[in-house]
Structures are given as structure tokens and as C-alpha cells.
Amino acid sequence: MAAMTAHPSLAPSRAAPDLASHTEPAATFDFTPFLRATHQHALAADSAPGGQPAHTHAGRGPSLVCKHWLRGLCKKGAHCEFLHEYNLRKMPECNFFTRNGYCSNGEECLYLHIDPQSKLPPCPHYDMGFCPLGPACAKKHVRRALCLFYLAGFCPAGRDCRDGAHPRWRKDLERPKLKVEVQREEEELKRQEELERQAAGLHEPQRDMRDDRGGFGDRGDRRHGHGGRGGGGAGGGKWRDRGGGGGGGRRFRGRGH
């Protein structure tokens, strides 16, 4: 029986690259244009609906949704440095929740409700191992697993250690503050700002009470005893002859002088 020899094109050494580089021709159908136009089916990854190129931003791109776009008031359009899309993870922070600690919209609010405690800086005393103020400290106490080798006196991994944190012992730290002290400082700052605003309001130029003729108008007439709209004297009525101020029987309206 004659020995069977494999075809050189079917050799294992050449079959693997051919299979790896094999490309199937793209199938085309008569209804493909209809699907793309109606349902945006099989659109390219770098294109937007309508055949337009996708809108991309240079650099890292915006990280927050445009608050003016949410109300339909953004005038920058595609040149805006903020996102023009509904992305709940990138919504701006709710100012009402930040000021008052609660939001009347609750869970239905479109803006982010960030816990004020998450904005506090970490307490350096607690990071070193102990804070004398405990839960009354005005800063955040973050629990971290400490490196057992470092606690024993030496860690061979040094700064590259992944077994736990290496607390930094510093002697020039400020005295820890209570939460009440921080609130008092904030109230004092607000009170100082209010006093500055009031002082600025007192220095505003007062409106001149004189009229165009150099007199004092109605108020000035009353103050100087001319009777305002009425005649002279303290009686001063609607008609000068009724005011008793020397009108001479003439029936007309007068303004002081």
C-alpha cells in the first residue's frame, strides 16, 4: 500500500497561520440600509446617529454635567466644557443639600447628595495611631490596617509594602480641635462677614432729598413749616384759602413756595 502524503498546503505548520488570518467576507443584505436608517443598526463605533462623526473632547474631557444644559439654557453648545448628557454619576453637586444637610426632592433629586463627612480631611493624630478627642474630633478618622512588620520595628518592603499602612510619626502636629470649636469658628466668620456687609451698606452714598430747584420738595416744605401741598402755615390743606395761611382767597393748588 502506498504511503499517504499530506498536501503541503495542509501541513500543520502552515494551517495555523492561515486559520488565524482567515477573514470571512462581510455579508450584505438588501434590508441593511433600511435597518441603519430606521433603527441605527450596525453603526460604526466612531460615528453618531445620522452618519455624523462622534463628538469627542480633547484631553481628559469634562467630568460634570452642564447645569445650564439641564435647564435648556446653555449657549455654548458643542464648545461647552461640561457634559451635555444625562449621566447620574457625573451630575453636579446639589447646593441645597450642601447648605442645609437635606434636600426637599429626596431621592428624586437629579443632583448629587454628597455626605459632608466624606469631605473632611483625615486626622493626622488618628493616622499615627491615637487621637485624644475620639469621635468628637472635627476631622475624619479612617481605619487602616497597619503593617505588622512595621509595628514590630522594621518592614523590609519599605514604602512598597502592601501588607498594611506605615504610620508617619510627626511631632509638629497642631492640637486636635473639637467639632464644637470648628462650628464656633464658622459662626464667627459668618458674623464677621455680616458686619462687613452692614458696614459697607452704611458707606453707600445717600440719595439727595432736594428737588431740581434746590429746595426740599414736599418733605422739606413740611419740615420748614410751609405746609406741603396746602397753603402756608401749619394748617396746610388741599386749597390754599382753606389752609388759613395767607392764601388771599385764591383757589388754586400750591406747593410751598
Image (cartoon, rainbow, N blue to C red):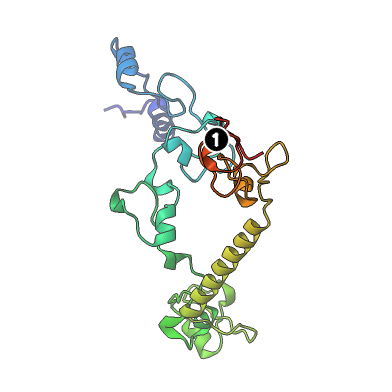
Identify the residue at the far front of this view.
248
User: How dense is the environment of label 1, judged by Cα within 10 Å: few (below 14), some, or many (20 and up)?
Assistant: some
Identify the residue at the far top of this view.
30
Q: Quadrant of residue 18?
A: top left
Q: Position of residue 98 (x, y in %)?
A: 43, 58
Q: Which residue is mark 1?
A: 80
Residue 19 lies, with reference to residue 170, above or below; the image says above
Secondary structure, mark 1, is loop
Q: Position of residue 206 (x, y in %)?
A: 66, 50
Task: Kindly identify the amino acid type of the residue bearing the numbered disc 1.
Answer: Cys
Identify the residue at the far left of this view.
1
Residue 232 lies, with reference to residue 117, above or below; the image says above
Q: Residue at x 26, y 28 (%)?
A: 1
Closer-to-camera residue (137/254): 254
Closer-to-camera residue (148/216): 216
Q: Residue at x 39, y 57 (%)?
A: 97
Say whether residue 162 is left or right of residue 41. Answer: right
Q: Position of residue 100 (x, y in %)?
A: 40, 61
Q: Quadrant of residue 194?
A: bottom right
Closer-to-camera residue (101/151): 101
Residue 53 seen in render = yes
Residue 114 seen in render = no
Q: Residue at x 58, y 40 (%)?
A: 231
Residue 231 lies, with reference to residue 205, above or below; the image says above
Say whether residue 164 is left or right of residue 202. Answer: left
Say whether residue 14 is left or right of residue 244. Answer: left
Closer-to-camera residue (232/104): 232
Q: Position of residue 78 (x, y in %)?
A: 53, 30
Quarter of the image that includes the C terminus: top right
